[in-house]
Image (cartoon, rainbow, N blue to C red):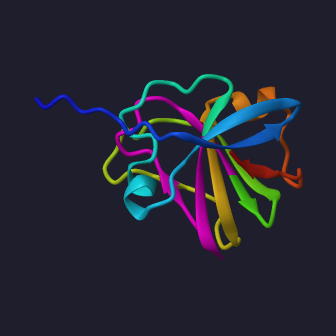
Amino acid sequence: MADVRGQQLPITAVTVLGSEEIFLEVATTPQQQALGLMYRDPLPDDRGMLFPLGRPRPVSFWMKNVPVPLDMVFIYDGVIAAIAAEVPPCATDPCPTYGPEGQLIDQVIELRAGRAAELGLREGDEVVITPL
C-alpha cells in the first residue's frame, strides 16, 4: 500500500475566534481545496484550514479520507452562517455531505472537532481573517 500523506500548506492567515488566535493554512487552488485535510493528523488547537471560495455560493463538504473528526465553520460576508460540529470521518460510500443547504457561503474554516464549542462560536459571530 502506498504511503499516503496529507498536504501541509503554509500558514498564510490568522483569525481570532472566541478570544484565541487561530493560524490558518489557506487552501487557495481547486486541487488544494479538494485535498483539504485528507490523510492529516488532528490539528493543534491554534490551527485551522481556510477555504476561500471566491464567489459566494451554496456549498457542501465531505470527509472522504479525513481520518479525524472536524468542526466546519461556514462563513458569509465575514459572519458565521452555520457550524457543522464534530463531523465524523466518512464510514460509508458515498460519504455524507455537510453544509447549510441553500445558504450562500464565501469561506469555510475547518478546526479540530470540538473546537468551535470550546471557543464559544455561534451563528452570527463576526470573523475577521487577516493575511500574514
Q: In this view, does 94 lie to the left or right of 109?
A: left
- Vertical placement of 120 versus 58: above or below? above
Q: Reply yes or no: does residue 8 show up in magenta.
A: no
Most common SS among magenta residues: strand
Give the residue at x 68% y 67%. Answer: 105
Evaluate whether residue 86 shows in this view. no
What stretch of residues is rendered in magenta? 49-73
Q: Which of 42 and 88 is in front in this view?
A: 42
Q: Which residue is drawn at 39% across and 50% down?
A: 95
The answer to whether residue 55 is above or below residue 60 is: below
**Please, is residue 52 above or below residue 26 in the view?**
below
Residue 44 shows in the view: yes
How far across and how far down the image is residue 34, in percent? 40, 56
Tell me where residue 58 sits by quadrant: bottom right
Up-down: is 102 above or below 17?
A: below
The residue shown at (64%, 54%) is 108
Q: Residue at x 45, y 47 (%)?
A: 36
Please give left or right for residue 29 compared with residue 132 in the image: left
Q: In which quarter of the image is the N terminus?
A: top left
